[in-house]
Image (cartoon, rainbow, N blue to C red):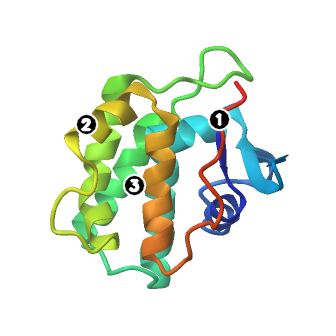
């Protein structure tokens, strides 16, 4: 999975990604990060979004969330912490877990994006649950822009290398 360099650095600053998750990648003069398989799974499964939202609300960068919403974010991360049965491998998150997580993220994400409706359409949610990388990155990009960051001046990242 590839993400824009500025988005990757921002997610790292929020604690949603770690140094080892990001491998610099350049194409046609544009800077990206190729994500580790565990980071890509965290992005697609919603765990990185939960961490980003917790960090943003704690710092006051987005509208405060209720204690119930904070608990939902923490619970959304819990199912994803189950280790893989094979040491050193990445555990793929089941579609039912992804659906649970993205549904749990919706209220806090609504507040962060200043939206009264679910910021993820039913079609996009279905694609997220299926593991669509582009939709997952797009949701992060919208949050990035909603917090006052400028969108990248270049086109979206090329298709993943994997």
Asked if labels 2 and 3 touch by Cβ distance under 8 angstroms, the answer is no
Number of the front mark, 2 or 1:
2
Quarter of image, res 35: top right
Name which residue lies at 46% across and 44% down. Answer: 136
Residue sitting farthest toward the left? 116
Residue 97, x across and y down, in percent: 35, 31
Residue 137, x across and y down, in percent: 51, 48
Number of the front mark, 3 or 2:
2
Sequence-wise, which precedes: disc 3 or disc 2? Answer: 3
Label 2, residues with CA under 10 Å away: few <14, some 14-19, many ≥20: few
- Which residue is at the front of the view, 125 or 4? 4
Name the residue that disc number 3 marks: 74
Name which residue lies at 46% across and 82% down. Answer: 61
Residue 1 placement, left or right of 138? right
- Which residue is at the front of the view, 124 or 153? 153
Q: CA distance from mark 2 to mark 1?
A: 25 Å
């Amino acid at each position: 999975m590839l993400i824009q360099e500025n988005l990757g650095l921002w997610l790292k600053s929020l604690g949603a990604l770690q140094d080892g998750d990001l491998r610099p990648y350049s194409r046609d003069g544009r800077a990206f990060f190729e994500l580790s398989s565990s980071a890509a799974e965290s992005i697609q499964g919603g765990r990185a979004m939960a961490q980003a939202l917790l960090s943003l609300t704690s710092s006051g960068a987005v509208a405060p969330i209720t204690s119930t919403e904070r608990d939902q974010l923490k619970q959304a991360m819990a199912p994803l912490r189950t280790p893989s049965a094979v040491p050193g491998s990445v555990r793929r998150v089941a579609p039912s877990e992804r659906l649970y997580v993205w549904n749990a993220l919706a209220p806090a994400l609504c507040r962060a994006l200043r939206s009264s409706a679910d910021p993820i359409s039913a079609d996009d949610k279905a694609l997220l649950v299926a593991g669509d990388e582009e939709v997952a990155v797009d949701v992060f990009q919208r949050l990035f822009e909603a917090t006052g960051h400028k969108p990248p001046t270049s086109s979206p990242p090329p298709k993943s290398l994997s």
